[in-house]
Amino acid sequence: MKNIKRDLIEGKAALLVIDIQASTFIDDSEVRSIANMEGFKQRMLNSRIAIDKAREVEIPIIYVQEIHRANLIDFGRELDGDESIHCLDNQPETELAKEEMGYQEGDYVIQKRRYSCFFGTDLEILLKGLKVDTLILVGALTDVCVHYTFVDAHQSDYFCRVIEECVAGSSLEAHHASLNAMEYLQTGAIRSLTQTIEAMSKTQI
């Protein structure tokens, strides 16, 4: 049985901007609390193109912010791997990159304590209220928060699309491995920025 050919946007879309935070633009350290692949910052900046287009055609924009309490009580097992302490609620680096991403009043913001944007948040309630069918994902990390959010969205029966030029991983190898894994779950999930902008344009009345 062949896979059903799907449109890039099925039904109503929302743009999910995952963990594009101030640290990306103010921390140029070679050694960071979370490893970033080469070209990370530019890929996050590419997301602004998708954000501006979504705003133009009235696709809801949902910013997601990873944030942890300064006393570290809510990290759980997150520090058992390669990541060190990050995204504390008393650090300016934790703020959303509002200026770079063109945040406006009326955009939605979700805060999360875990990798998936769905885990322990009200994202599902928001998406149901917005009557969303397709989630378009940009942000970081491809191999962590983007990937795990994609999987939860997939298992909740959303159509999932990832803009390849607008996501970045902890390494190039991990980035490509996660893109392949997501494409395995939904054929056509990985799309170019050009393809996505064209599909967004077709949603205009």
Image: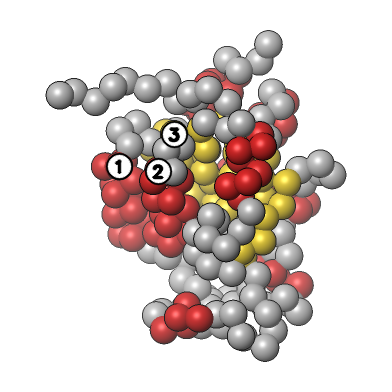
The reply to whether residue 39 is visible in this rendering is no
Vertical side of 162 occupied by 123: above or below: below
Percent across and percent down for residue 70 are 69, 84
Q: Quadrant of the N terminus?
A: top left
Q: Viewed as shown, does residue 21 lie left or right of 159?
A: right
Q: Residue furthest right?
A: 105
Amino acid type, callout 3 = Phe
Q: Quadrant of the C terminus?
A: top right
- Per the image, the residue denoted by label 2 is 154
Which mark lies nearer to you, 2 or 1? 2
Q: Viewed as shown, does residue 83 lie left or right of 25?
A: left
Depth check: give the residue in front, 113 or 98. Answer: 113
- Per the image, the residue denoted by label 3 is 159
- Earlier sequence position, callout 2 versus callout 1: 2
Image quadrant of residue 129? top right
Vertical side of 57 occupied by 181: above or below: below
The numbered mark at residue 185 is 1
Q: Residue at x 71, y 59 (%)?
A: 96
Percent across and percent down for residue 18 are 58, 53
- Earlier sequence position, callout 1 versus callout 3: 3
Vertical side of 71 occupied by 8: above or below: above
Q: Residue at x 53, y 22 (%)?
A: 11
Between the residue at mark 1 and the residue at mark 3, the CA separation in whole angstroms equals: 10 Å
Callout 2–callout 1 Cβ contact below 8 Å: yes
Percent across and percent down for residue 97 are 71, 57
Image quadrant of residue 60? top right
Amino acid type, callout 2 = His
Depth check: give the residue in front, 177 or 158. Answer: 158
- Earlier sequence position, callout 3 versus callout 2: 2
| Residue density around tag 2, few if under 14, some if 14–19, many if 20 or more, within 10 Å | some
Q: Residue at x 46, y 71 (%)?
A: 35
Element carrying mark 1: helix
